[in-house]
Image (spheres, grey):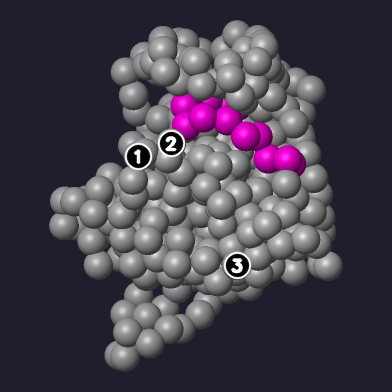
Amino acid sequence: MGGVADLAPHFVRATEMAAIAAAPWRGRGDGKAADGAAVEAMRAVFDEVPFDGRVAIGEGERDDAPMLWIGEPLGSLQGVAGALQVDIAVDPLECTNHVAKDLPNAIAVLAAAPRGALLHAPDCYMDKLAGPAEVAGEISLEADVPYNIEGASSALDKRIDEMRVVVMDRPRHMELIKALREMAVTVLLIGDGDVSAALDAADPNNSEVDLLMGIGAAPEGVITAAALRGLGAHFEGRLVTTTEDHERRAREMLGDDVDRLWGRDDLCTSEDALFVASGVCSGYLPGIEEIGDKVVVHSEIIDVMTGSRQLIRSEHPR
């Protein structure tokens, strides 16, 4: 029996098929339809993958069709003795609204690791803090904004007024944005897409982004943790529940750990893990292209064990 990395071609195909299915909905104003198409395409691929898989964290609960629901069994070897047991953190279509409006950075994305190695939690929110390896030990979700900006600027050898921080453009971030701007930090507001934003922040060669801060979806937080573990970058998160149902489900699944701070390696505890993404709308990855009778897909694999990043260009018949 091999490891999770041996299944990389199957996982790439899953994100590719989801991206291809979502692409016709670009700019058509119906993000829900795009998401549904991506979900069904990805599920169809997972049905054929030779593993005993499970959705550890995803878009919703079992009754929230057409989502890939949390706890959903995946693969062609479910319950087979000796089969490779794998957990998946997944967003078949990150930036659903961007697809509806044909805006950048929409991707189909997942992380995969051995059973139990990815945070198994309900679909709630997560407060996130991400940056390059240099900021590790200098920033923390336990600290306030001035502490984190001062620590990161020192670690990166930048003046505070040279710092650039990505924040999702949401009312919940008004105080965060105010605090950053009071320090003369450049705030880069994004509508959606904090996975790609975190990858930008993790890259020490990307001078456009230094940190990602703020609250986004928890599944994307787990996916990001896997990617940044592979890159040796900094990530931490803390779950945020906004409804009584989410709070109850989180307590059932995690007990008192609901309130803890999760480090990068707490969210993805194994090095036998993969991050896989395929572009839908151009941005972090080129989007789906239709060239003659072919559909061209651009994907990336981050192998956590080796730290390698592999860009893949593939062609499929239209």
Residue 65 lies, in percent from the top left, at: 33, 45
- Where, by quadrant of the figure, is residue 22 drawn? bottom left
Residue pointed to by mark 3: 76
Q: Which residues are magenta?
A: 116-129
Residue at 80 percent of width and 45 percent of height: 270
Mark 1 touches mark 2? (CB < 8 Å) = yes
Residue pointed to by mark 1: 64
Residue 157 lies, in percent from the top left, at: 72, 29
Q: Amino acid at mark 1?
A: Asp
- Where, by quadrant of the figure, is residue 263 drawn? top right
Residue pointed to by mark 2: 61
Q: Amino acid at mark 2?
A: Glu
As for residue 122 lying within the magenta part, the answer is: yes
In-image side of 182 versus 234 (left or right): left
> In the picture shown, does residue 238 fall above or below 201?
above
Give the foreground label among 1 and 3.
3
Residue ranking furthest to the left: 28
In-image side of 6 versus 248 (left or right): right
Label 2 – label 3 distance at C-alpha: 22 Å
Viewer-side residue, 165 vs 50: 50
Secondary structure, mark 2, is: loop
Residue at 52 percent of width and 66 percent of height: 47
